[in-house]
Image: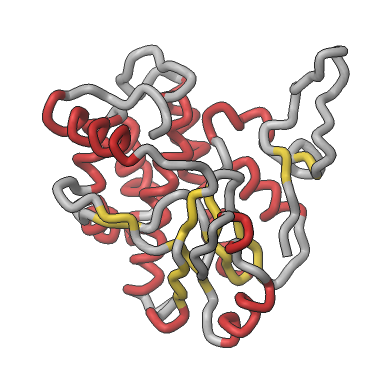
Amino acid sequence: MYIPLHVGAEGKKDDDGNALDLGYVKDNTGDNISLKNPGFCELTGIYWAWKNLDADYIGLVHYRRHFSRHKTKDPFDGVLKYNELEPLLDKAKLVVPKKRKYYIETLYSHYKHTHYISQLDETRQIIQEKYPEYISSYDKVVNRTYGYMFNMFIMERELLNEYCAWLFDILFELENRVNAGKVDMPELSAFHARFYGRVSEIIFNVWLDHCLRTDRLNKHQICEIPCRFMEKVSWFRKITGFLRAKFLGVKYDGSL
C-alpha cells in the first residue's frame, strides 16, 4: 500500500549534473509544488498525492516515522501492513498517530518558545478572514497541551479533498504575506524556514476539531495508531532542548 516518493525532487542534481534519480516516484511530476519543499517539507508530498493519486484512501508517513501496531526489534518489521489496516477501514475514515503530549506547554506556547510565533499569529488572522467558522476551534486547539502531529494520516479521499483545499489555501496566503514582508520575523535558517510544515501540524488539529464540532466526523470514525520512530531517538537531547526552549528562551536549531 506504500508508494515511495522523492519529495523536493525539482532541481535536484546528481554528481554528474543530471536530474537526481533515487528510483522513486518524484513529487515534481503532474500537478505539484515540489519547488516549495524547503519550506513546506513533506507537504509537497501530500499535495502531490492529493492532485495525482486515484485511491479511496490516501495518507502519508515519513522515512523517519511510520505507523506501527507492534513493537519489534527491527522497527521496519513493525511497519503497518495492509492486512492490519484494511479491517479498520470498515469504520475509520481517518487514521492518525497517537496524540503527542507536551504536558507543561500548550501548542501555542511551545511554538512561541521554539520557533517564531508571528507565523502562527498570522495564520490565525488568515483563518479569521477566510474561514471564520474555524476560529473557535483554532483558539481551543492552540491552548491544548497535546495534538496529532507529524503531518501523518490515512484519510478517506473525500475528506482529503476537503482538508487539502482548506490547508493549502491558508498556507499559500501565509506564504504570500511572508514574501511581501507582512510577517515580522528575522532572516530564517534552513531549519526555521520549514515553518509551513510546522504550522500545518497544528492547524490539522483545528480542521479536525471543526469536523467533530460540526458532525462532519465523529470520534468513532477516527482511529489512533502508534507512531514508530525509525531512527534512534536521543531522549536526553529532546528533553533538554524542550526545557531550554521553555525556560531559557533558546529556540531549536535543528530537529530533535
Q: How is the image coloured?
A: secondary structure
Task: Say which residue appears at 76% left-offset and 44% top-offset.
Answer: 31
Relative to 216, residue 23 above or below:
above
Percent x, y of residue 151: 49, 51
Horizontal side, residue 231 vs residue 12: left or right: left
Percent x, y of residue 56: 70, 72
Nearer-the-camera pick, 226 or 94: 226
Nearer-the-camera pick, 228 or 104: 228
Q: Could you tell me which quadrant the N terminus lies in?
A: bottom right
Relative to 213, residue 109 above or below:
above
Horizontal side, residue 91 vs residue 204: left or right: right
Give the mark count.
0
Does the image show residue 135? no
Nearer-the-camera pick, 34 or 60: 60
* Residue reaching furthest to the left: 247
Task: Say which residue appears at 87% left-offset and 13% top-offset.
Answer: 16
Horizontal side, residue 24 vs residue 96: left or right: right
Percent x, y of residue 126: 37, 42
Nearer-the-camera pick, 132 or 36: 36
Q: Could you tell me which quadrant the C terminus lies in?
A: top left
Quarter where residue 216 is shown = bottom left
Relative to 95, residue 246 above or below:
above
* Residue reaching furthest to the front: 73
Relative to 39, residue 50 above or below:
below
Task: Say which residue appears at 61% left-offset and 84% top-offset.
Answer: 87
Does the image show residue 251? yes
Task: Say which residue appears at 80% left-offset and 34% top-offset.
Answer: 22
Percent x, y of residue 90: 59, 87
